[in-house]
Amino acid sequence: GDSFVARTAPPLVARNCRRILEESSMAAVSARSLSLRASNPSMGAARASVRAHRAVTTRAVISPMQTDAMFLGDRAANKEVSATGASLKDWKPDSWKSREALQQPNYEDQDELETVLQEIAVRPPLVFAGEARSLQAQLANAAAGNAFVLFGGDCAESFKEFRADNVRDTYRVLLQMSVILMYGAGVPVVKLGRMAGQFAKPRSEDMETINGVSLPSYRGDNINSSEFTPEARRPDPERLLKAYDQSCSTLNLLRAFSNGGYASLQRVTKWNLDFMEDKERGAEYRALADKIDAALAFMAACGIDEDSPSMQSTDFFTAHEALHLGYEERLTRLDSTTEEYYGCSAHFLWCGERTRQPDGAHMEYFRGISNPIGIKISDKSDGESVVSLVKQLNPENVPGRITLISRMGAEKLREHLPRLIRAIEDAGLNVLWVTDPMHGNTVKTDSGFKTRPFERVRDEIMAFFEVHEQMGTHPGGVHLEMTGQDVTECTGGTAEVTIGDLELRYLTHCDPRLNASQALELAFLMSSKLAGIRERGNFGNIPAR
């Protein structure tokens, strides 16, 4: 499980060189780093006490620089629970087949499907176990209040839109967003792309009817095609091979960008997209880039090597919804280092609300893979069932394994998220809290376009931050559907995309995405909000400025 992922670039917020170095390091999970601060002193003290006690009994110390330390102790031999928290009792990569599997395509020819899956089973893994362990270490650190997690990328990747430029542009916007957050809020940022595997999409109905004609629903380019014809809508197993090939190509690009100098902080002023040059967000980003250049010059004057790996490269991980269980099973591999199974289609896999039934096939698959995993929750989720599910997937409460991704809408989030946080805290569970402000804010216009008003997306993120500060817990990250392209799919923002503009560049095959300008605007707003939380001394263990 050798890792090809380089070290995370340090944040560039510092009053002096010592502070730069202190804030760039990802602290190991410890009794100190698992305590959280709160704006409510009594609540915060109680929660910090619980977390500090909890940290004493955690399985092992994890740090990104030595992630395999947690796998070398005596307990690594306990194969009922993996070192990263997976529940292995009576589990195999195909044990999900004994459960009901929802949201699976109905293939006409099962022999054809099996031939394709056998081909995938002998192909190389797309990611490696050591990379997934490195990510879990960083997610544990974020859950402890020492970092912020940024998920971003397409709603659903497409074969037609796949080009190196599109991959580069989305990657570049994610880098820009992370720099804005690091510089403005002074926190390390863990970067995950909804890329290199985010194809399959759950559907509310198996069939779609237009003008009296019913055909199978479009389930993503790895299953069928979006054109409304019988041939296009037929689930085609060969598309799984094409999805694997595209994922492999995308990962090659991402690794090259991350480790080949493109992600160098010295290039920060050159990251603006061409169409952003004359826009307000572009000007704001250029102003920030100038400040970063000044910080880099200051660091060089203090003797810090600007050519060090941490300044020239960055960590970047991939994530997708693990929906197609046959595909995921065949890319599940036994790690030679730990003799434990990892889902090697992505570093991080998540499960949506439609498929997270405790006794369902997806939860059976998820419980046995040693990757860090995510669970989507909504205002309809009840605390008892979420606690039960977290315990099922992480029976020994290992930090960094579970991410809870809330999707509610701002008003419902303020009403319902506190009770879910309270249930998790009262149960003493280690989770990372992330908000998905996209799916609870989708509306349909009179002209038939699905869109998401920027202001609603913004409001849900701000509500997420405010609820966590009030509860004395850590707002760990954000999960966005976005693109580096100059699309007109979400209305609003300073880009002033109107409902009438939607038809101009509406390119998505599925749900509407934020464009680059809207994504950067959100980053500046989040940076300002997080900076305020930090100044009040309520951002985990990162000291107030």
Image: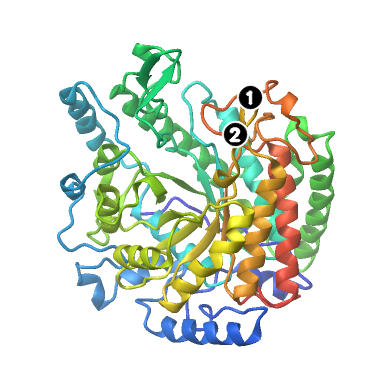
Q: Position of residue 536 (x, y in %)?
A: 74, 76
Asked if residue 325 is positioned above or below residue 437 in the image, the reply reads above
Q: Amino acid at mark 2?
A: Pro
| Residue 512 badge | 2
What label sits on residue 506 in the rendered view?
1
Give the image location of residue 260, x and y in percent.
Answer: 56, 43
Q: CA distance from mark 1 to mark 2?
A: 8 Å
Q: Which residue does the image show at 37% across and 83% down from the upper left? A: 57
Picture coordinates of residue 490, whole percent (x, y):
67, 35
Residue 79 can be seen, yes or no: yes
Quadrant for the N terminus, please: bottom left
Q: Quadrant of residue 7?
A: bottom right
Left or right of 530 in this view: 308: left
Instruction: Identify the residue shown where x is 74% and y is 66%.
Output: 531
In what element is the residue under mark 2? loop
Query: Which is nearer the eye, 296 or 348?
Result: 348
Residue 452, above or below 501: below
For the residue pair 345 and 267, the one nearer the viewer reads as 345
| Residue 189 visible somewhere in the drawing | no
Q: Quadrant of the C terminus?
A: bottom right
Mark 2, Cα crowd under 10 Å, few <14 / some 14-19 / many 20+, is many
Left or right placement of residue 371 versus residue 291 in this view: left
Labels 1 and 2 touching (C-beta < 8 A): yes
Along the line of sight, the residue nearer the viewer: 444 or 430: 444
Camera-side residue of 540 and 309:
540
Where is residue 541? Give x, y as percent.
Answer: 61, 77
The image's colouring method is: rainbow
Residue in the picture at 77% in, 44% down: 269
- Decide if residue 263 is on the left or right side of residue 280: left
